[in-house]
Image: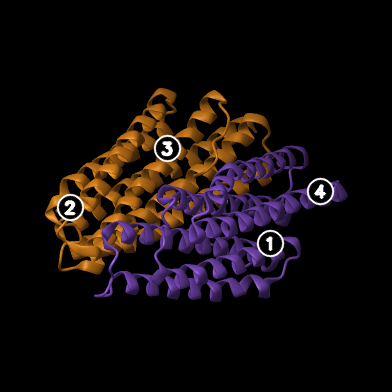
Chain colours: A purple, B orange
Amino acid sequence: MRDEFRADLQIVSQLLVDMAEGVRAAMRQATHALLTADRRAAETVIERDAEIDNLYRHVEERVCDLLARQAPVASDLRAMITALHVAADLERMGDLAEHVAKTALRRHPSPAVPAELRPTFTEMAATADRMAIKIGSVLARPDADLAAELDGDDDAMDDLHRNLFGLLLGEDWPYGVETAIDATLLGRFYERFADHAVNAGEHVVYLITGEPTPTPG
Amino acid sequence: MRDEFRADLQIVSQLLVDMAEGVRAAMRQATHALLTADRRAAETVIERDAEIDNLYRHVEERVCDLLARQAPVASDLRAMITALHVAADLERMGDLAEHVAKTALRRHPSPAVPAELRPTFTEMAATADRMAIKIGSVLARPDADLAAELDGDDDAMDDLHRNLFGLLLGEDWPYGVETAIDATLLGRFYERFADHAVNAGEHVVYLITGEPTPTPG
């Protein structure tokens, strides 16, 4: 029974790792679509979000099946509930990558991001990528220290986000309201992506250390 | 055992109803703060979000306790997983009300919403309120028809959201980029509030009818 549970848990963990990799690839490709006005890349991200959603459903089915067959208690039960939380965060991160891709597509063939904002979005995307890698790593091999680094990454994302508003509100902003609206929404998509990565990391830390569960945010 | 499960489930349902009422009150008060630049109201929403978060944690504790003690299967297990989903949606709706309140506070004593946008936000808030009421009702007494009405409400919200962008992008928009940024974010908060209400409703419908579970959005 115990070995069976471990084997089942391993399958769930692997599904979560697959989700983290899918989400990372989605945000990388969405950013590429955004910064190079690459229509095909944007469409691919949108099409492939269904794969992330499918992985999410597989996690949920596996967890339900496991709860029904094995009736885990204590830390095993906690691991199951945590898997559901992490899957929900990753699923949402996939949606946010899709939103970035949709924004790129809506402005195509024009670029959605003007030259002045490209360095900021390039940095935001690099930060998001770093966070997605860390989530994948801690899911593959629990590491509370690595998970805790996500807080620092999130602070960096928040700084970039504030910096973005500074650029939009500068007296010399030449692009008008439409571009400011796109940039506002895009900034929020990257920032929320980072928030969900932090949440997922906190859930993994909880599993490792028993620190109290965070509220999803 | 069966009676005990029913009694526990009843407690979980009541916690969800309490959450729905808390979330509704939060968004009402946040809108009031937004439209009347009422600092005290905004602060109250922000302070009281902790109560919604607490209810969320109570739902999760109850569900875990119930899973550990009773090891439900089939539809009982489904009800537990659904409760977790609905609680997560409601918790997030509370956060979005808090975001509205924070936006009101950031601009205080100026109003964050100029006169031209007040009718749109008043309508968005009325739609959000209708949806929060319906979630509370279907949680108190399952009603698939009432839950299905949420889709129509969400369509109304999407129309208002598009209408908002139309106003922001009109040639006669006189308020500059800062107000457009606030309005963009506020629009997104109400629209996401509605999305989570639809998700929560779909989970309840799933519980009633067995229709496949939606992906959280």
Determine which of the numbered discs, if any, sits on residue B171 in the image.
Answer: 2
Does residue A60 appear to the left or right of B59 in the view shown? right
The answer to whether B64 is drawn above or below residue A194 in the figure is above
In three-dimensional space, the C-alpha distance between marks 1 and 3, rounded to whole angstroms, equals 30 Å
* Labels 4 and 3 positioned on one and the same chain: no
**Taking the image as drawn, is residue A213 in sight?**
no
Mark 2: secondary structure: loop
* Labels 1 and 4 positioned on one and the same chain: yes
Does residue A199 appear to the left or right of B71 in the view shown? left
Check disc 3: other Cα within 10 Å, few if <14, some if 14-19, many if 20+.
many
Give the amino acid type for the residue marked by disc 4 in the picture: Phe
Check disc 2: other Cα within 10 Å, few if <14, some if 14-19, many if 20+.
few
Please state the horizontal and vertical placement of residue B170, each as a whole percent of the image: 20, 50
Question: Is label 2 or label 4 in front?
Answer: 2
Q: Chain of mark 2?
A: B
Q: Residue at x 54, y 30 (%)?
A: B207
In three-dimensional space, the C-alpha distance between marks 1 and 4, rounded to whole angstroms, equals 22 Å
* Comes first in the chain, label 2 or label 3: 2
Please state the horizontal and vertical placement of residue A31, each as a whole percent of the image: 53, 60
Give the amino acid type for the residue marked by disc 1 in the picture: Gly
Question: Is label 2 or label 3 in front?
Answer: 2
Mark 3: secondary structure: helix
In three-dimensional space, the C-alpha distance between marks 2 and 4, rounded to whole angstroms, equals 63 Å
Q: Residue at x 55, y 70 (%)?
A: A127
Please state the horizontal and vertical placement of residue B99, each as a whole percent of the image: 34, 59
Give the amino acid type for the residue marked by disc 3 in the picture: Val
* Comes first in the chain, label 1 or label 4: 4
Q: Nearer the viewer, residue B85 or B14?
A: B85
The answer to whether B63 is drawn above or below residue A135 in the figure is above
Q: Nearer the viewer, residue A85 or B216?
A: B216
Q: List the residue tagged with mark 4.
A: A5
